[in-house]
Every structure is written in structure tokens, then in C-alpha cells.
Image: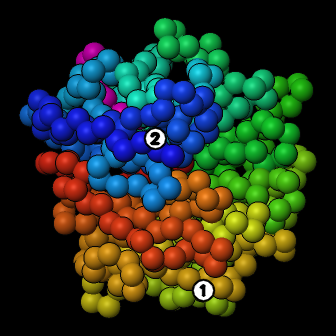
Amino acid sequence: MRKRPLLLAAALTTGLLTALPANSAAAAPSGLAGDFNGDGYRDVAVGAMCTTVGSASCAGAVVVLYGSSTGVSATRKAVITQNSTNVPGTAEEGDLFGSSLAAADLDRDGYSDLVVGSSGETVGDRDGVGAGTVLWGSKSGLSGGKGLPQPSGLSEWGGFSRGAATGDFDGDGDMDVTLTGQNHTRLYLGPFTRANGPLSNYRVGELGTTHDVIAGDLSGDGAAERVYPFSVDGDTGGEIDYYRWTTSGYKFTKLPNADGLSGSIADINGDGYGDLVLGDSSDPNSDKPGGHKGGQITVWYGGPNGPDPAQTPTVIHQDSANVPGSGETDDGFGMFLSTGDINGDKFADVAVAAPGEDIGTAKEAGSVTVLFGSASGLRTSGSKSYTQNTAGVPGTAESWDRFGSAVDLTDITKDGKADLTVGVDGENGSGGVWTLRGSATGLTTSGAQGLTAAAVSLKSTYYFGSVIAQ
């Protein structure tokens, strides 16, 4: 049983409050990705990249909400900035600490660590080049950190670390990290140590303009693939490339018929291979040859060599049969995605955000649609959409709330069913995160809760809930 958390409510010079949970000294750490204090419950890390720290506007912060049998709460948390003890760097204006997040146990101590992107970080005389930091897990939660080696030759305003992902990319049993930002993509190979960081790092070949990365095992060999969506002239829907580890090294594969700038990987059809779910949220236009009005998602099913580029993917949008709503301009359906088994049936399900969805007269109030996996793939039957006007969901749908500014499906209550965390980065002008519990029948609004920026002691902040670690 989790102990009652010890609350450390002293005000920091950053204007933030920090509360770190206690943990049983006798218990071995769980080794679960996302369990930063090793107590067996996965935790939720949320970016607040435009938080003022001291007098530095948009320096950024990360809020960790610690999981428990009853979910998360405003009292079991930690607020971490670059001014926190033993965190590298200094909180400066425009750093955007928390603009990307990814979790994994990098140093093999049983406690999950957290990779944090600061995509606006200034290095020397180069403004906004970006940087990455690892925050180390421990029995008291995240504490201290190590800066990832800074690539040379980054251009000003390059936004390096805008995208972050973790996985065992070379199949050696150690977790690795990849960071992206415009035309610079880097791979950091484990094992990591707290003193020296990664074992090695190098630049991945030119991919074009790349702001994000998706990671997961598409080929069932235990090594994670790295999927890089990137923008190209004449197709604002993006192109998709992925790297697969083989006995002769990394193999580069194109999915020339795939579009999307967001995504997630999980086994949708239960065949033992991860499937790639892509979100193509932009509306068709003269510069974008494909897609659907209001946005769409596609599922590319994995296999022993990864997704076959010649396959016909599953395509779902708000005008698909059984999907709630209808495709409308600027809905942004598929702008953010997450995968996880909500109902415990061993098939991964998909949460699809449409942060631009209008709810009645409320502009860009936002919605999240849940679609369920099955042996025949992702299905639309039984799909359901959630907004802040859904019965049992806290709050009210208001203009510019952007319910669905980020989504994450993670089992934070240790009941074998993924819970949904939703970013609402426009809530009250500063942001928030909402949670709904998974159950055998899907998501339930029983016990749903909303945590605003003020509730977790963030002040002078914008866009809290725009990033959630996956």
C-alpha cells in the first residue's frame, strides 16, 4: 500500500511549490517506464513550458503527478525547473523547459528517468538552439539530472529537442534516447550513467525538417523502431520514414503513401507486432494532396519486417461510420494521439485528440475520441467522444480550452487498464490536465478529475498540459 505522501510546501524562489511523495524503503523499485519513484504505480509527467520561473518568462517547468490506486492528485506531485536542486542549467527567458518529454529507466537502477526537452534553450551566443536533459528517478521521485551532450553546429532558433523518444533502438537491452529539431536528429545510446550520461551519441542522417519522433517495436524483435515524420515541399501532411535495427545495422524504410505529423505505436490487433497509428490533422488544400476535412488517422500494421509500405492502411475520421461528430475545418482530429489498453482485453486502443473541435458556440473547446482495437484491427464500433460537456467530466466546454492539447493512455492505478490523461492547455488561460479511469467497458467518468495550473501550484504560466510524457 502506498504511504501517505510527505508534503514539502515551502515556497521556492521560482514561485513554485514542490511536493515529493514518500516511498517504502523496503520495496524494490518496479522498473516500470514512467514510475519515477519505483512504487509500482506509473506516474504522469506534464510539461508547462511557458511557466515564469523567478523573473524569467517562458523558462518552463515540469509537473510530475504521482500515480496511486486512486489515480493522481494535486497533493502528490513535484514541480521541477532548471533552478531546482542539481538540475543542470539555469532557468532563463524562453528556454521552454518541458517542451518535450519521454520516460525510460536509462541508468538501469529500477527507477524510471525522464528526458526533458528545452527547445528554446540558448547556448553561448546561439539563441534558441535547444537542449536536452535527463532527470533521474529515485525512491523520492525525480531528483537532479544530467545534460545530454550538445551537438555542435546547431543553428539559431533550431529548436533542438522539440521531439523526444526513448526505446531500445539497437536491441542490446539498454534504453536509448533520440532527440529531434528541424534538420538535426540525434541518437544517444545507452547504457547511461549519472556521471557521464550516454555511452555514445551521433547524428542521424539528414531527414529534412523534423520536429517529432515516434518510437516502438513494429517488427516484434524486441528492438524499437524510430519513426520520423517530416515536412516536405508540396505536402504539408508530411512524409514518414523509419529506422529498424537488423543484424547488419539500421535499415532505413520509407512509407511513401503515409501522411501525418503525430503518432503512437502499440499492438492494435494482438498479433505480436506493434502497429503505427498516424495523425494527419491538417485539412486538405492546394499544398496538401491527401487527408480529410477536419483531420484523420491511419493505422499501418506491423510485421516481422515492420509495416509493409504496400499495404492499405485503416483510415478513420469523424465522417467514418460510428465515429461521433463530423469533419469540420480546423477540428485537428489526430493532432495528438496515444495508445493503450483501456478495457483490459489485450488489444491496444487509441485516444485521438481534436483540440480545435467547436462544441456548440464554444470555439476550439476540444474533444477526445476513443477507438478500440480488435483481432481485425482498429474498429469504429463502440467509439465514443469526450468533452468538458460530457456528463461526469469536470468543467464546461469553453472557447479556446483546447481539451485534447495532449493525450496519454497509461495505467496509473495498477489495475491493468489504461487511464486517459488529457491536456487542456487553454483552461482558464493557463492550462490544466484532466484524467478519466479505464474500465472493462471503456473509459468511465466516475472519479474523473480536472487539475488546473493553479491547483498544482503553477503561477504565471501558459500552456500547462500541452505536453504529456508517453
The answer to whether 1 appears left or right of 224 in the picture is left
Q: What x and y, as percent, mark residue 443? A: 55, 74
Is residue 219 found left or right of 97 in the rendered image? right
Q: Is 310 left or right of 319, judged from the image as shown?
A: right
Find the magenta span and give its range. 117-125
**Residue 446's image quarter?**
bottom left
Amino acid of disc 1: Val
**Magenta span: chief secondary structure:** loop
368 and 345: which is toward the camera: 345
Going 54% across and 88% down the picture, which residue do you hit? Answer: 324
Residue 314 magenta-drawn? no
Residue 81 image offset from top left, x and y in percent:
27, 32
Q: Quadrant of residue 279 in the image?
A: bottom right
Secondary element type, mark 2:
strand
Relative vertical location of residue 37 with respect to residue 403 in this rendering, above or below: above
- In the rendering, which numbered label is found on residue 101? 2
- Give the labeled residue for mark 1: 323
The CA distance from mark 2 to mark 1 is 30 Å
Amino acid of disc 2 = Leu
- In this rendering, does residue 316 appear at all? yes
Q: Secondary structure at mark 1?
A: loop
**Where's residue 26, x and y in %?**
54, 27
Give x and y (percent) for residue 135. 43, 27
